Amino acid sequence: MPEVPVYPSIPTRILLPIDFSPSSQAALEMASDLAQHFHAELYLVNVIPEFPTTTIPDLIPETAFLQKARTYAELHLSKCKAALVAKGVKSIFSVEVGNDIVGNIMEVVDREHIDMIVISTHGISGWHPLVFGSIAEKVVKLAQCPLLLLRSVKPESEVKTASGRSMEWW
């Protein structure tokens, strides 16, 4: 029988996967409050999707895209870290690159000895999550440590039709 890891009831390292969306910003607030309350370290991670290998590299300048995305993520993570420092919350961050976002998140959990995860949903409905699945849902299924799932409000991606009914973009 596989051994189940034992986690302390008080977290010391809290992971927050962040994509800078409004729902992940709300999760940042909750995670920072928890980190402050428990005197825990907050670990922020942003995963940049990597392009699949193509036979026509000239069409998409992959290296330039990845560097621009990394610079953007590091800038925003630095701003988050500065706000956390102002609140007295110890934090670190990393930018991961890969096509398996959930896999990257779980690698960080193992590598950094995370003992709690705070993650938000995006509130997306329609066919998109049915086809692609929810990152939060997959993390919930795979996480072996305590996890706080924050449900966000439905995004304002709806358009009203002439009849007044709403129509979702996704």
Image (cartoon, rainbow, N blue to C red):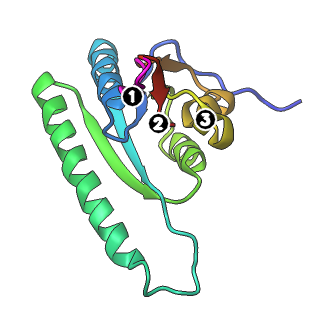
Circle 3 is placed at which residue position? 129
Circle 2: element type: loop
Q: Is residue 145 visible?
A: yes
Mark 1 is on which residue type?
Answer: Val
Residue sitting at the far front: 162
Circle 3: element type: helix
Q: Which residues are magenta?
A: 153-163
- Report x, y in % for residue 49: 48, 58
**159 or 117: which is nearer to us?**
159
- Quadrant (top left, top right, bottom left, bottom right) of the N terminus: top right
Left-right relation of 76 to 93: left
Name the residue located 28 percent from the left edge and 52 percent from the top edge: 73
**62 or 97: which is nearer to us?**
62
Left-right relation of 169 to 134: left
Circle 1 is placed at which residue position? 159
The mark nearer the N terminus, 2 or 3, is 3
The residues tagged by marks 2 and 3 sit, at their Cα atoms, a distance apart of: 13 Å
The mark nearer the N terminus, 2 or 1, is 1
Name the residue located 27 percent from the left edge and 66 percent from the top edge: 68
Residue sitting at the far left: 86
The circle drawn on residue 169 is: 2
- Report x, y in % for residue 103: 60, 48
